[in-house]
């Protein structure tokens, strides 16, 4: 399926990125420089497992992104990691990164993301999902 940029609607072009042992084929927009990653590719490109979990099992259900997923057409959610905001598809866990965001995420320390943000915990709690680390109540009492 042809993938188009969710920001400027240019067709995305497959581009190989090498990171350590991995060769990852990402979809790059020549118009705005944005980047689409299929599920799992963010983990390969960053090696950051807590970051990967943010886009998979801790994804939640909120959609506060205007973008539609270039991979499956699903709605996307804006996720936050260490102050960086990026878009994740709620259906296929594909990730949309604007220019510079991949480099920024690659610089994020995995340890920094081990603890979920209060906003994320609240979102997961609303979604009825299991909240790690003792749950929302434990978090509330810790404040
Ligand atoms: Zn674009
Ligand atoms: Zn998708």
Image: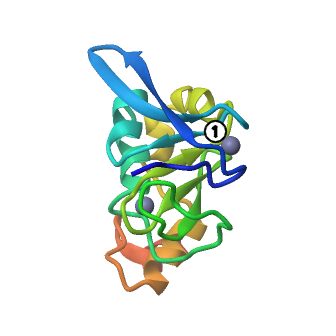
Q: Quadrant of ligand 1?
A: top right
Q: Can residue 143 be seen?
A: no
Query: In which quadrant of the rendered view does residue 24 lie?
Result: top left
User: Picture coordinates of residue 4 (x, y %)?
Assistant: 56, 50
Q: Nearer the viewer, residue 107 or 92?
A: 92
Residue underneath mark 1: 34
Q: Is mark 1 within 8 Å of ligand 1?
A: yes
Q: Which residue is depicted at the point 29% across and 20% down?
A: 22
Instruction: Tell me where residue 3 appears, x and y as whole percent.
Output: 49, 49
Asked if residue 11 lies left or right of residue 74, the reply is right
Residue 132 screen position, x and y as percent: 34, 66
Q: Nearer the viewer, residue 49 or 25?
A: 25
Up the image or down, 10 lies above or below 139; here it is: above
Instruction: Point out the residue furthest to the left here.
Output: 21
SS assignment at label 1: loop
Residue under the point 56% across and 60% down? 117
């Amino acid at each position: 399926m042809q993938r188009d940029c969710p920001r400027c609607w240019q067709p995305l072009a497959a581009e190989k990125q090498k990171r350590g042992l991995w060769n990852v084929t990402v979809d790059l927009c020549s118009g705005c420089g944005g980047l689409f990653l299929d599920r799992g590719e963010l983990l390969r490109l960053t090696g950051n497992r807590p970051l990967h979990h943010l886009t998979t099992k801790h994804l939640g259900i909120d959609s506060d992104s205007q973008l539609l997923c270039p991979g499956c057409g699903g709605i996307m959610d804006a996720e936050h990691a260490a102050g960086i905001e990026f878009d994740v598809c709620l259906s296929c866990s594909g990730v949309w990164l604007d220019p510079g965001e991949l480099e920024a995420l690659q610089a994020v320390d995995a340890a920094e993301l081990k603890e979920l943000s209060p906003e994320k915990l609240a979102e997961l709690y609303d979604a009825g999902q299991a909240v790690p680390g003792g749950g929302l109540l434990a978090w509330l009492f810790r404040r």
